[in-house]
Amino acid sequence: MSPAERAHPGADMERFVREQMAFVGLVEADVETIRRTAPLVLKHEAALTEALYDHFLRFPETAQFFVGADGAPDQERLERRKHSLGRWLRETAEVAMTHGFVYYLLAIALSHSHREYGPGGKIPPQFMVGAMSLAQSAIAGVLRAELSDPLQALEASIAWNKLLLVHLNVLMLGYLLPPRESCRLGRRAIDRPRVTRHSGRVTRPGTVGELRASGYTSKSVKQELRDNLITRLKAGAALFPGIVGYEDTVLPQIENAILSGQDIVFLGERGQAKTKIARLMVNLLDEAIPALADCETNDDPFAPISPAGRHVIAEQGDRAPIVWLGRDRRYGEKLATPDITIADLIGEVDPIKVAEGRYLADELTIHYGLLPRTNRGIFAINELPDLAERIQVGLLNIMEERDVQIRGYKVRLPLDLFVVASANPEDYTNRGRIITPLKDRFGSQIRTHYPARIQHEIDIMETERTRFATESVETNSPEYMKQIVAELTHLARRSTEISQRSGVSVRVSICNYENLLSSALKRAIRLGEAVASPRVSDLDAMLASTSGKIELETVGDSTEEKILGKLAQKAVLTVFNRAFTGGDLDEAVAAFQGGLKIDVSDVMPSDAYVRQIGEARPLHAACKKLGAKDPAAVASALEFVLEGLHLSRKLNKDMKAGQTRYGA
């Protein structure tokens, strides 16, 4: 790098942006404020962009950049610029000063300051500064109107102003480069044709020409998924971290489908991780891919499919700016409901664009739906049978024929998509069905299932339960209590009193486990104990988290409470018989026959349990076998042993006044 290159800020954009953020005082608190108020600003996106360009058209000095050969405003160009401004506003609201976004801003400045095309010629820097000032004022006005507290509005306005000043400083770099000699520096140091590294981070190409010079090769999303899957298989890496119990059943079928380039439909009851698997497939995409800037359909820079993308390439060629799409932005998801329309999934004619003077048959009048906007990504449809059959036909065309009728004219959309759908088998008879031609388009239909093993259920409970920041009370759950929760769910899946057609979701286990831990935590807080451990007496807390998640058979007059009570008893007894066998507790039973009695309660302090068993060594031994060391664990183990002996018909149980007494 020459001395001139080292002196130019573009030689180290990462450092330049850090310095500017520090100089204007943009700190983490400001970033949080911007993100918190972003929805309020974006709600007015259309009005903000409209007002800004109306302002430009009022002054001949700025109106000249948006007029046609006849001197009248070029509405098509204005529409594209408004869309571009809206996109900038949306990305600004994310406060992600990534390499891709910074160089996107820089590419805009270069195209404005060094361009040799377009009406009006080069755009002077004072108009760029003025435009940013107008944006600052407009956003401040929105915040004043939306926030009732004037101080909050002022704080938010200051935070937004700081961020826009950083943007303006980046944009001004494009104006520091002379057209010829120093432009060579700009191309080398700022928008280098090949991928380079600054401070260990990757700097990506910012225009189509630079992307082509870097040697980048486009590939389909299915090829991308396939290549990355092969890499993971070679490395022995986990395909879907956090998915338990599918290692020998579902996952091999998913691998086969991806290697074959087939779209997938998951068939299974509720709570079988169908949607979670679809979302985890995003991790098989590349970290980021290039797309034409300001294109709603994520167009490939080398092969744009939308009219807007083709127009940009025709007008700017290799100078057309590109953006880099992260894998998370390439995933789209929609819950199928009967009220979904073709407009939601595919698109519809935008009456505003027609009113502006375009012909109805002009593709530029289309407002694209979710599928085109997920082009070059993964699109998931949950509960596919709920989708009306006529809408399924439209999806069929997109998946196979690639053209679709919108208001009477054809639009060729060669979308590059990997489609994943989910369906509950019960939907085929209760609410709808997947039309046969559409089912035929899905390469693989994969049947999911509930965890076959208790340990798998426990692993899922531990992984998926809601966790909070560190609290003053430590919560420890004994293994046998986890087994009771998982066993209850497995028993429910085999119960004749519970409808097996709708299934018993894994969410039952997760929510029951959360409530069990919460009941123990609540007791520890009230009693001032440092450790919380769930007990058998806490099992009643699971009624609220189970009710509503199961459907009873209509035969009989049993209530949910009675059925769940029986299932809980069966679960406790099953786990108890695993923990103790034969005559393990004969000495403990003998102690009760000798007159020992023990009281338990869900509000009794743990120390009270320790005092009650006193010198009863057989009970001490039983608690020790269950791993109980501290008083909270001893209380939990003791209740489990006592309830297990009662359910084994070796102890009597007397319940009254919120307390339970066990004796012979």
Image (spheres, rainbow, N blue to C red):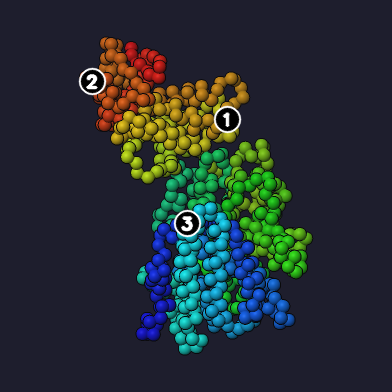
Hey, what amino acid is under mark 2?
Gly
Where is residue 294 shown, x and y percent of the image?
Answer: 59, 68
Determine the image quadrant of residue 579. top left
Residue linked to disc 3: 151
Q: What's the residue at 57%, 27% (across, down)? A: 552
Please tell me whether mark 1 sits on a helix, a strand or a loop: loop
- The residue that appears at 30% across and 32% down in the rendered structure is 529
Q: CA distance from mark 3 to mark 1?
A: 52 Å
Badge 2 marks a residue whose secondary structure is: loop
Left-right relation of 636 to 115? left
Query: Which circle marks residue 140 in the picture?
Result: none
Disc 3, SS: helix
Residue toward you, 254 or 345 = 345
Pick the residue in front: 557 or 450. Answer: 557
Q: Residue furthest left?
A: 615
**Residue at (46% x, 70% y) in the render:** 166
Mark nearer the N terminus (1 vs 2): 1
User: Taking 257 as reference, is 644 above or below it?
Assistant: above
Tag on residue 551?
1
Callout 1 environment at 10 Å: few (<14), some (14 to 19), or many (20+)? some
Does residue 255 lie above or below 164 as drawn? Answer: above
Q: Quadrant of the N terminus?
A: bottom left
Q: Nearer the viewer, mark 3 or mark 2?
A: 3
Report the quarter where the C terminus lies: top left
Question: Relative to 19, is 566 above or below?
Answer: above
Residue 587, quarter of picture: top left
Give how far across and how far down residue 405 sits, in percent.
74, 59
The residue labelled by disc 2 is 614
User: Which residue is found at the position 52% from the left and 41% from the top?
Assistant: 272
Nearer-N-terminus badge (3/1): 3
Mark 2 surroundings: few (<14), some (14-19) or many (≥20) residues within 10 A: few
- The amino acid type found where label 1 is placed reads Glu
